[in-house]
Image: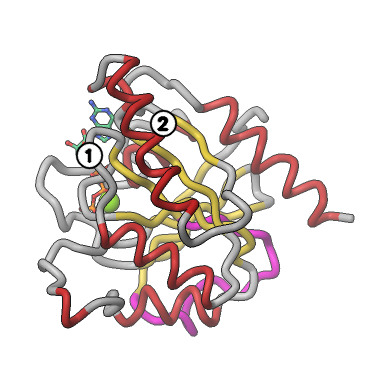
Amino acid sequence: MKITSAEFVISNSEVAKCPDSRLPEYAFIGRSNVGKSSLINMLTERKNLAKTSGRPGKTQLINHFLINKSWHLVDLPGYGYAQVSKSAKKTFQKFITAYFEKREQMICAFVLIDSRHKPQPIDLEFMEWLGEHQVPFCIIYTKADKLKPKALERNINDYQAEMLQTWTEMPQYFITSSSSGMGRDEVLDYIDRINSQFAQ
Ligand SMILES: Nc1nc2c(ncn2[C@@H]2O[C@H](COP(=O)(O)OP(=O)(O)OP(=O)(O)O)[C@@H](O)[C@H]2O)c(=O)[nH]1
Ligand SMILES: [Mg+2]
């Protein structure tokens, strides 16, 4: 898919104030600093469309971007920045959960996972939460440029093995690097395919 236009629409913390449109939308979610905002810039080939930072906790609101005047990309704040203790399991920021519960036009979430790390309970718990709430999602393993191919493969296999314990059907996954552009065509083609089904 060719990106012909990408515009910031609105930021807010209230799902009710998100754009009042029926356009299909795709939300990027994952731990703070995993590279959600950078991936939005990489996909759209716009350097500063979404604000990025080396420090976790940069994105604080729900940010809508209108792409090709026909669908939305949504940048969300990260979870897991304020260390979630075991007893506080499954307590993700309130408006993130409200967004996924209420936003009907959100047709596929992309859960971003830092490919450098071994499986993290908070990522597995978040995907379980999405499953319990019937939210469709795929996985994106980010920052692939930071690892040697063997280590990357090992970490992804470890995540997949963990997920097999909960899921009978494995979600689709992609491997990306916002610095090299790896995975760009695959993610955009996937979105394009869903968009055309949505339009029928
Ligand atoms: N090497 C490399 N660095 C990346 C990649 N993606 C993001 N980064 C870096 O990781 C840091 C965090 O990136 P962001 O895109 O701001 O992460 P985020 O998930 O939006 O973070 P929050 O908004 O705080 O939740 C920045 O310093 C980016 O430059 C990547 O694919 N490769
Ligand atoms: Mg961000």
Question: Where is residue 85 shown, x and y percent of the image?
Answer: 12, 74
Q: Quadrant holding ligand 1?
A: top left
Q: CA distance from mark 1 to mark 2?
A: 22 Å
Disc 1, SS: loop
Q: Nearer the viewer, residue 160 or 101?
A: 160
Residue 120 in the magenta stretch? The answer is no
Q: Residue at x 52, y 57 (%)?
A: 109
Q: Answer yes or no: disc 1 within 8 Å of ligand 1.
A: no
Q: Is residue 153 left or right of residue 25?
A: left
Question: Where is residue 114 shown, x and y percent of the image?
Answer: 28, 40
Give the amino acid type for the residue marked by disc 1 in the picture. His
Classify 133 as above or below 123. below
Q: Residues within 10 Å of mark 2 (few under 14, many from 20)?
A: many
Q: Nearer the viewer, residue 149 or 14?
A: 149
Q: Main secondary structure of the magenta part?
A: loop
- Residue 9's disc number: none
List the single residue furthest toward the right. Answer: 200
Quarter of the C terminus within the rendering: bottom right
Of callouts 1 and 2, the N-terminal one: 2
State the image quarter where residue 153 is shown: top left
Q: Identify the magenta region.
A: 13-27
Q: Answer yes or no: disc 2 within 8 Å of ligand 1.
A: yes
Residue underneath mark 2: 42
List the single residue furthest toward the front. Answer: 165
